[in-house]
Amino acid sequence: MTFTVHDLISLSPVLLIGVGILATLIIEMLVKESEKILGWFTFVLLLSVAYLSLILLDHTALVFEDKFLTGGRVNIFFFLFSFGAAVVSLLSMEYIKKAGIHFGEYYIMLLSSVLGMMLISGATDFIMIFIGLEQMSVCFYVLAGFNRRNERSLEAALKYFLLGSFATGFLVFGLGLIYGAVGSLSITEIVIGYETLKTSPLFLTGTLLFIIGFSFKIAAVPFHMWVPDVYQGAPTSVTALMSTTGKAAAFSALIIIFSPIIQAAYPSFFTPVISVLAVLSMLYGSIVAISQNDLKRMLAYSSIAHAGYMLIGLAAWNEKGVSGVIFYLVAYTFMNLAAFGLISLIEKRDLRGTEFSDYKGLGFKQPVLAGLMALTMFALSGIPPFAGFFGKYYVFLSAIEAGMTWLAIVGVISSVISVYFYLRLIVVMYFDNSDEIVMVTPSTSAMLGIMISVLLIIIMGVAPGSIINLINSTF
Amino acid sequence: MIPIEHYLFLSSFMFVTGVVGVITRRNAIVVFMSIELMLNSANLVFVTFSSYLGNVTGQLVVFFVMAVAAAEAAVGLAIIIAIFRNKLTVNLDEINILKW
């Protein structure tokens, strides 16, 4: 086993971010008032990682004793994680100052969680997936409770931590059973032995426990109960990170694990399990979101519904489904980043001001912010010509091609329901009036982050073909 | 030699005990202990199969799981202490400002 220059080059996004974490630690230690420069340092670092992963798109390599894959689809995920986190670092700079949690450690945790996500998306071995997932999750536990004088933030951290590690317990136990049935944790070994394994009760139980553990991480019903509390209680910039790139990382693991396994034996017993999860998540998320009065909590339920739509693509399991899920993940990431970015701007100093009633009359007092928010809500509800529409379109199309038309119908019904609560915000902003609106002057960095996200939403809505072609070219 | 079923039964028993503990107990520390029990039951599964299959991977995984559990314990106990400083309780029923 040798480590060639080619391997080194293809690993460079991961290595760069690792070096960047160490550099951040050192800057934090040596420089006085380092938190002022660390935000921009993190942004530039993540941007260069995103750039590197794009130019290395066709540098495929299998490194570390065949335990880590880079290039192709994996690099698209690298790009998504690092670019999404770069936008989050822009949104964070002013927000964490406002929340009184302006410490350098914030950026270290942010970068470490991105490294964990990258480890997940490139893994070809269950150990690697487990370690990446845990690195990401532990950083998220810390970030969720980062506002340690705020009761809501602490409560979010505790709930996230307890339920997250509960899920890890299921995941590890499932891995133990899979290991017992296969004799190895490498995904290729599982594919080779799949014909005999698919009747082994040990393997099936293990896989089921593994899916349960992952359903916690992607927030699929009935394993969603932590999501609303955590998304509402955590600092808004952290929620933006968790709900977008964190979810994308868990989905990337599902794509990587199931692509070889399901290709070996379709239709397998996973398909009904995933379909049930998809239907429950879509309907539950959309229906419960209607009754919410807090915007962050409403977006949390809507993210459960979005996880359901993406699961349709996994359940359909054809090439269109997978590229549809990846497209959806990219679209969803930037829609949610824009939405949470705007919420973090309007949020007050004491971290209140995320209720619908706080948005009354915003359309007249803050036309720019309200306009961007309205655009984001249209995109999230799947109205063309924005990114959200094409995400749903590709996913539903894949379900119909796989002969699961009923799944697409449930999806359409659920998106019709979801239009109600997205448009409700627009109604509140433009048709209600209130004198209590506090004028905010948005900072340059946060506006830059929001503009990047909104621009990407529009580009993906106007020219979805070129992006889906880019994703398809990595198969 | 003790048959493998005994080990698997023991670890399943530990796992179920952990799950029941997480669901029924209300003290954050006890819930956390139950989660550790679940992780350790998985470790037992790995070691059992490792010795049974004559394959060293399982023992390596145990090291990783132990390291991860240690990191989780550090973060988790820190969160529980921060909660206790704020609210003077670690009872999960009393930590309930976030709900609809």
Image (cartoon, coloured by chain):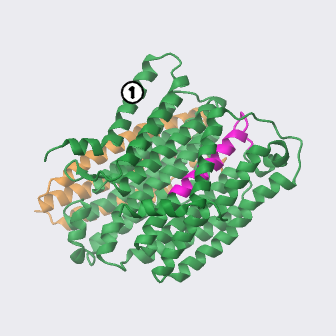
The residue carrying mark 1 is A23
Query: Up-down: is A444 above or below A302?
Result: above
Chain identifier, orange in the render = B
Pointer 1 local density, CA inside 10 Å: few below 14, some 14–19, many at least 20 = some
Question: Over which residues does the magenta segment extend?
Answer: A330-353
- A464 or A405, nearer to the observer: A464
> In percent of the image, x 83 and y 53: which residue is there?
A430
Secondary structure predominantly adopted by residues drawn in magenta: helix
Chain identifier, green in the render = A
Mark 1 secondary-structure assignment: helix
> In percent of the image, x 60 and y 52: which residue is there?
A336
The reply to whether residue A456 is visible in this rendering is: yes
The reply to whether residue A221 is visible in this rendering is: no
The image quarter in which residue A150 lies: top right
Query: Up-down: is A153 above or below A199?
Result: above
> In percent of the image, x 62 and y 55: which residue is there?
A458
Q: The residue under label 1 is which amino acid type?
A: Ala
Q: Position of residue A3 (x, y in %)?
A: 18, 43
The C terminus of chain A lies in quadrant: bottom left
**Along the horizontal axis of the image, is B30 left or right of A450?**
left
Q: Position of residue A386 (x, y in %)?
A: 63, 60
**Along the horizontal axis of the image, is A179 left or right of A475?**
left
> In percent of the image, x 52 and y 30: which residue is there?
A40
Q: Position of residue A462 (x, y in %)?
A: 60, 60
- Magenta segment includes A341: yes
- Magenta segment includes B96: no
Q: Position of residue A283 (x, y in %)?
A: 61, 71
